[in-house]
Amino acid sequence: MKPGPPLERVMRRLAETPDDFLAEPRIDHAGELVTAALVGDLFHALGHAPTTQDVLPADLRDRNRMQLTAVVVWLLADDWVATAAPDRAALAALLGDRIAQLAATGRVDQFIGDVDRREELARTLILTLGLVPAGESEAQAADRLSAVSVVERRRLLRASQQAEERARAVREALIRKAAEESADKYTRE
Amino acid sequence: MTEPNDVDRYPTLSDAGRAMLTRMTEHPAAPAYRNRSGNRLLAEDMSGLAAFEAETLAAPIGWRPGRPPAWIGPFVAETYAKVPHFRARGAPPRRLADVPTTARSDLARDIAAFVPDDVPVDRLINFRTTGTTGHPLLIASHPVVAARYLAFHKRALARFGITLRASAGDVGVVLLGHQKRCFTYVSVTPTMGEAGLAKINLHPDDWRDPDDRARYLDALDPEVIAGDPISFASLLALPVTIRPRALLSVAMMLTDGSRDRLEARFGCPVLDLYSMNEVGPLAVADRTAGGRVLLQPNLYVEIVDSVGRALPHGERGEVCVTGGFNFCLPLVRYRTGDTARLAMAGDVPMLVDFSGRRAVRFRTADGAWVNNIDVSHALAGLSAAQFALHQGADGAFVLALSPEALDDAPMASAALARLLGDVPIRIEPIASEDKVLQYSSDLAGSTAE
């Protein structure tokens, strides 16, 4: 693998994502940002055919994935990417399956605001393009990505278990109070 | 699971409060109280409730139609962070207009997903609502939320120049029902010196002697009577001599005719409140202002179309709310199912041309459509406690009137004929004692959706 950009550079750019890339994605008639057009423009700028149906399904309605895709387009519109000249397959893999997988594990604002998630996205991006962060060996880069991902997977699992327990407790508490054995209101609807 | 006891129901009950409960239940003319309930308020709740009331009475609504107030952004962000249903949607949109709407069906699917993570479950309570169309729904609530209702009632009453005075030894409110089966109980209101609260059923089956109803109401002499147009119609038929300071009508459309009769009989204002379990008291009708004036300083109201897009100021559509005072159920673009347009009453937004569910159009004799709001205007003079208009697939109408108002049938027929032209109109009594669906139609194209 070739050396890529310093990790910090990608993480800093991520933290500085402009508002334009965080606008509401167009889904049906709502939202203004047309994600497929952003991706098409990026492909074109990097010398590839701008058709992207194989990257973003035409009927995609996953708002979070579309938002994360727009953020990754912003990360890729950087000088080092043009210099690295990733091939179409690597770009398609990153903007297609990899982003879909990441989007399923967290919200776009977490990937921007949370330092571990920022590192995970930056490392995923660099490695999927077939590069390693500047100054790291392949093994170091793989270990570090695995570490941040495992922490995240554990956190997600814990959160999901807690969410289930909480929902059960709320349902039980609501049912426990007999329907109208509730509390005084001056009027009853 | 142990059954609730009086310590659960009235945690702060004093000897005077207990005496009030006894007075209400053991009066010789008292009805058979069928249920038990209470305020469930703790001593430590009181200072927060007092502060909430002071703020609610003083705060301006603080926004104008189409301009979300500054608190909306942080509120939506916090709700997206703490409430599972919203968290699952991803990052909060930065513009309120981009937030998808929610509806009753979302709450019905899993109410637990709408309760914020930081609400302790040990004091959760529910209110069950059936509405006039939908399935039963449990609303997550809390004793403090229930007690907060009073602050909005006081705000509404202040608009009519009334300040509640009931305190120790007085009965503050009697809530009337008139149903075959009705939840009835007594309680006290700690934030009003343990003034009494009685929820009674005027149906004769609940009383040893039907004449006891008037005797009992006269004995309690409540400061406020709350009810709906049906129970108020029953009240009008009783020989009571009480002089309440206000009547609060909720849950159904109150016709101008009904209100005039009640105001003439009791010599006090009748407040027509727009209130729903999911949102609490939203607005109070003010005939001088020409609409329903909003009551909640921390509730933003939009008018939206059938797909949830905010409509331009002045257009009529579905009432959609964000915010609220129920910390167990923060509302983000919640569609109420009710129809109105927004206007200003001085500095206060109000709902105009309101109808209590989605708009229905009726087809006239010459094939034109008229809105149900036109029917409301045409029938405004009815003295009926309630009415319902249905148009069949053949274009013929059935107007259902509460039984005591069948004398109004010729007037109602004439008013409808002026609006709808030469169409068949059959009048029948309302059979059920429960709420009716006021406007309905079997014709294609009768709803906007």
Image (cartoon, grey):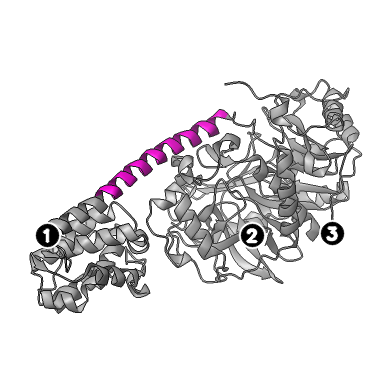
What kind of residue is marked 2? Arg
Q: Position of residue A97 (x, y in %)?
A: 17, 56
In the picture, the disc for residue A138 is 1
Which residues make up the magenta segment?
Answer: A150-176
What kind of residue is marked 1? Glu
The alpha-carbon separation of the residues under discs 1 and 2 comes to: 85 Å
* Crowding at mark 3 (Cα within 10 Å: few <14, some 14-19, many 20+): few
Q: Earlier in the sequence, mark 3 or mark 2?
A: 3
Q: What's the chain of the residue with tag 1? A: A
Residue B225 highlighted magenta (yes or no): no
In the picture, the disc for residue B418 is 2
Q: Position of residue A111 (x, y in %)?
A: 32, 60
Q: Of B33 and B288, which appears nearest the observer?
A: B33
Q: Name the element at disc 3.
A: loop
Q: How many marks?
A: 3
Q: Name the element at disc 1.
A: helix
- Residue sitting at 32 percent across and 66 percent down? A25
* Quarter of the image that includes the N terminus of chain B: top right
Question: Residue at label 3?
Answer: B161
Question: With A73 as the anchor, is B123 left or right in this view?
Answer: right
- Residue sitting at 24 percent across and 64 percent down? A122
Question: With B356 as the anchor, is A99 left or right in this view?
Answer: left
The alpha-carbon separation of the residues under discs 3 and 1 comes to: 78 Å
